[in-house]
């Protein structure tokens, strides 16, 4: 199958590209290599055809005309919560207008399906755990709002034009190639700082828990969604929470030394516990997270050992 991966030079997108190529698909990549987006030329699989272009650009139609993708994995996005609150116009331009540009081209050039990278951020603060696909959603940032709105655009395009989709609502994705200097990605941030002997900051009491899912597992969900999950949304995570303190201790064990821990107060909007019920993905996609956390931490640490310049 000819698959277009937008954001395919980024952290998650590059893992999706690798998985698609390993499965025998022909892959083209669209990425603008925006500095704040995490796209890096060295992440691009050499077996993929690369186009350096923004998803908002009118020239995207030329990529579609040449590649005629049968399916699209849409991961290109403005993914920073902070940037979305600082510049909600930019956030909406990339995440909404970029998506519409993509959908219009998909219909024009005969694409069959879009696999969309949605987010657990669409839920906001929830009243009960675990979170599942039926949990009421109340996003608390422009980023979460645009991801939620995107799912409605996908439903509209399916109903109006017959363009199929599957939306994957990711938990906290981690693994090699994650940006260790951004606002999110605590595992990448901690791994890099511990390796360098720098202090790490732990907010609140450190016992707050999130559902951390390995990038390779997320990529496999994208692969399965090419053929399954028509018109549905799925939670993609591990089904259990891990505390920040436990992540720190796991990385210390893997790296072999501790560093100074700087304690800080709770950040506004921090949620104490989030984990997902992924039984729908197991039943309809045949997917479940397979990477054990300790092995995922080891692979992440190895990546940053191999890339000390990051």
Image (spheres, grey):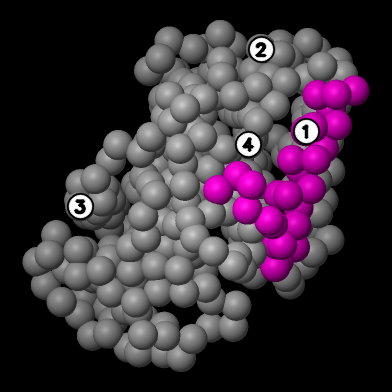
Q: Position of residue 98 (x, y in %)?
A: 78, 40
Range of the magenta residues?
Answer: 132-160
Q: Secondary structure at mark 2?
A: loop
Question: Mark 1 near mark 2, Cβ–Cβ under 8 Å?
Answer: no
Decide which of tag 1 and tag 3 comes sooner along the chain: 1
Q: Is residue 143 magenta?
A: yes
| Residue 230 horizontal side relative to residue 16, left or right | right
Q: Which mark is residue 214?
A: none
CA gap, disc 1 and disc 3:
36 Å
Q: Which of pointers 4 and 1 lies earlier in the amino acid sequence?
A: 1
Alpha carbon distance from label 1 to label 2: 16 Å
Query: Tag 3, which secondary structure?
Result: helix
Which label's residue is closer to the chain start, 1 or 2? 2
Residue positioned 47% across, 74% down in the render: 272
- Rendered residue at 57%/53% (across/down): 120
Q: Label 3 neighbourhood size at 10 Å, few (<14), some (14-19), many (20+)?
A: some
In this figure, which residue is indicated by the disc labeled 2?
Answer: 70
Residue 12 visible, this orientation:
no
Task: Identify the residue at image location x=45%, y=68%.
Answer: 273
Q: Residues within 10 Å of mark 4 (few under 14, many from 20)?
A: many
Mark 3 and mark 2 lie on one chain; the one further toward the N terminus is 2
User: To which quarter of the image does residue 21 belong?
Assistant: top left
* Residue to which mark 1 is pinned: 154
* Quarter residue 1 falls in: top right
* Residue receiving disc 3: 294
Instruction: Please provide percent x and percent y for residue 222.
Output: 51, 29
Closer to the camera: disc 4 or disc 1? 4
Q: Is residue 142 magenta?
A: yes
State the count of labels: 4
The residue indicated by pointer 4 is: 233
């Amino acid at each position: 199958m000819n698959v277009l991966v937008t954001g395919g030079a980024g952290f998650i997108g590059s893992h999706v590209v690798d998985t698609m190529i390993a499965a025998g698909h022909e892959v083209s990549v669209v990425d603008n290599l925006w500095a704040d987006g995490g796209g890096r030329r060295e992440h691009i699989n050499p077996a993929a055809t690369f186009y350096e272009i923004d998803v908002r650009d009118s020239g995207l139609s030329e990529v579609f005309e040449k590649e005629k993708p049968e399916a699209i994995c849409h991961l290109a996005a403005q993914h920073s919560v902070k940037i979305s609150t600082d510049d909600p116009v930019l956030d909406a331009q990339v995440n909404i207008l970029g998506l519409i540009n993509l959908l219009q081209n998909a219909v024009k050039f005969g694409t069959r399906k879009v696999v969309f990278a949605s987010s657990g951020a669409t839920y906001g603060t929830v009243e009960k755990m675990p979170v599942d696909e039926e949990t009421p959603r109340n996003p608390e940032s422009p980023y979460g709002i645009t991801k939620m709105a995107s799912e409605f655009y996908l439903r509209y395009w399916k109903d109006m034009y017959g363009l199929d989709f599957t939306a994957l609502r990711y938990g906290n994705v981690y693994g090699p190639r994650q940006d260790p200097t951004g606002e999110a990605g605590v595992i990448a941030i901690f791994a890099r700082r511990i390796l360098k002997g720098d202090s790490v900051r732990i907010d609140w009491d450190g016992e707050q828990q999130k559902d951390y899912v390995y990038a390779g597992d997320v990529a496999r969900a994208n692969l399965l969604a090419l053929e399954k999950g028509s018109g549905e949304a799925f939670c993609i995570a591990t089904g259990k929470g891990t505390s920040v303190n436990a992540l720190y201790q796991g990385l210390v064990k893997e790296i072999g030394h501790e560093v100074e821990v700087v304690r800080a107060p709770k950040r506004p909007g921090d949620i104490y516990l989030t984990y997902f019920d992924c039984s729908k993905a197991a039943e309809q996609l045949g997917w479940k997270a397979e990477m054990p956390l300790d092995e995922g931490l080891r692979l992440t640490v190895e990546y940053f050992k191999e890339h000390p310049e990051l």
